[in-house]
């Protein structure tokens, strides 16, 4: 995506509420033309405030936001080349679907014939052909969300902003709408910027993700890079589940770092760059293997006791602890249908992994 030009350029943007609350803190960020971009983070991290500043509903205390090369300072929301889809849909209950979608065009004086054509095109994009005369109360939550999307797209913005657009939907419908959003974004070719607190949602829809914490952007990367190579403990812990083992740097061996792990001992792991003092040695639960017999080969292995098992249907999350107090969690796929469990609480098992799957987190 870096070959494309930035459609949104955020330069040293800070937003303060009063003298004490800093909602967004010196954010520098480029969002490129034609990409699906996600602002991800916990509640209160500043992601929605940043989105609202792009939309023009809030003004930066410091810094500059440019859209398509134009400084947005002093530009009202209705004059910006962006449109926003809200978490609550905000469709008008007393209007039909067609009138809801046409509302923005009517306000800006688009001719009736042109408006009808664009409404028809927008409804076709979101697969609501034939729903023109229905009212919102006659539609499901997912269909109402599509109406909100059509109403935003009908004005042909250069950027579509989405504020937690799927949070009110049930899990299955949310997953289906994630797929539809990606297809829609690719078909219209405009930039989508979504705010979400759901890691799964961001990983599944976005070309790139900015992870935010306490008003700051901690890392910007493609989904796979973010998951496999987080740059900090916060990002590693926020994106999926992870085991983080406390350790101290004991030395360097070629391209490997030697870590002294509490409860495990010395471990040599691949690591580029510097690391000093206290660090985190991290392994994703799905990278770990469980076995009753001691595994062979040049791998890391820990003899541990099963402390707890959480069953999720397709998989189980197994919690273990060794005699030195080292705790690990392992994802195990439930591949066989059996009433006799192979993993039993209080039984000893071997946990193993390849050293190359280990991450070093030094902040």
Image (tube, rainbow, N blue to C red):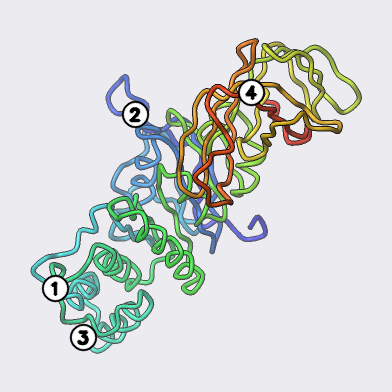
Determine whether the residue tagged by mark 4 lies in a helix, strand or loop.
strand
Camera-side mark, 2 or 4: 4
Determine whether the residue tagged by mark 3 lies in a helix, strand or loop.
helix
Q: How far apart are marks 2 and 4 (CA)?
A: 53 Å
Q: How crowded is mark 1: few (under 14 residues within 10 Å), some or many (20 or more)?
A: some
The residue that label 1 is drawn on is: 135
- Give the percent coordinates (x, y) of residue 170: 31, 55
Q: How far apart are marks 4 and 1 (CA)?
A: 60 Å
The residue that label 4 is drawn on is: 348
Front residue of 66/293: it is: 293
Q: How far apart are marks 3 and 2 (CA)?
A: 43 Å
Mark 3 / mark 2, whichever is N-terminal:
2
Q: Quadrant of the N terminus?
A: bottom right
Q: How crowded is mark 2: few (under 14 residues within 10 Å), some or many (20 or more)?
A: some
Instruction: Tell me the tag on residue 112.
Output: 3
- Give the percent coordinates (x, y) of residue 358: 72, 31
* Above or below, 352 relative to 145: above
* Above or below, 311 relative to 244: below
Q: How crowded is mark 3: few (under 14 residues within 10 Å), some or many (20 or more)?
A: few
């Amino acid at each position: 995506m870096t070959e494309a030009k930035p459609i949104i350029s955020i330069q040293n943007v800070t937003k303060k509420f009063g003298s004490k609350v800093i909602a967004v803190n010196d954010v520098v960020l480029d969002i490129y033309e034609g990409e699906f971009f996600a602002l991800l983070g916990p509640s209160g991290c500043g992601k929605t405030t940043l989105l609202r500043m792009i939309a023009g509903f809030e003004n930066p205390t410091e810094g500059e936001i440019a859209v398509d090369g134009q400084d947005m300072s002093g530009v009202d929301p209705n004059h910006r080349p962006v449109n926003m889809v809200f978490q609550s849909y905000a469709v008008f209950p007393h209007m039909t679907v067609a009138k809801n979608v046409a509302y923005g065009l009517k306000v800006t004086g688009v001719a009736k014939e042109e408006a009808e054509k664009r409404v028809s095109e927008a409804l076709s994009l979101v697969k609501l052909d034939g729903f023109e005369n229905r009212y919102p109360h006659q539609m499901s939550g997912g269909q109402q969300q599509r109406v909100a999307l059509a109403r935003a797209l009908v004005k042909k913005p250069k950027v579509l902003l989405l504020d937690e657009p799927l949070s009110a939907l049930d899990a299955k419908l949310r997953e289906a709408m994630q797929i539809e959003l990606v297809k829609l974004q690719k078909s219209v070719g405009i930039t989508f910027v979504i705010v979400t607190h759901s890691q799964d949602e961001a990983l599944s829809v976005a070309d790139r993700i900015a992870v935010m914490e306490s008003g700051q952007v901690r890392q910007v990367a493609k989904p796979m890079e973010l998951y496999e190579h987080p740059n900090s403990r916060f990002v590693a812990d926020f994106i999926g589940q992870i085991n983080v083992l406390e350790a101290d740097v004991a030395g360097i061996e070629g391209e490997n770092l030697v870590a002294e792990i509490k409860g495990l001992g010395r471990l040599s792991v691949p690591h580029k760059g510097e690391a000093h003092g206290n660090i985190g040695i991290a392994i994703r639960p799905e990278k770990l293997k469980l076995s009753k017999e001691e595994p062979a080969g040049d791998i890391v292995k820990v003899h541990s006791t099963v402390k707890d098992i959480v069953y999720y249907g397709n998989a189980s999350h197994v919690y273990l602890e060794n005699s030195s107090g080292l705790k690990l969690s392992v994802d195990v796929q439930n591949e066989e249908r059996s009433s006799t469990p192979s993993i039993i609480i209080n039984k000893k098992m071997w946990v193993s992994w390849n050293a190359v799957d280990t991450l070093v987190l030094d902040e």
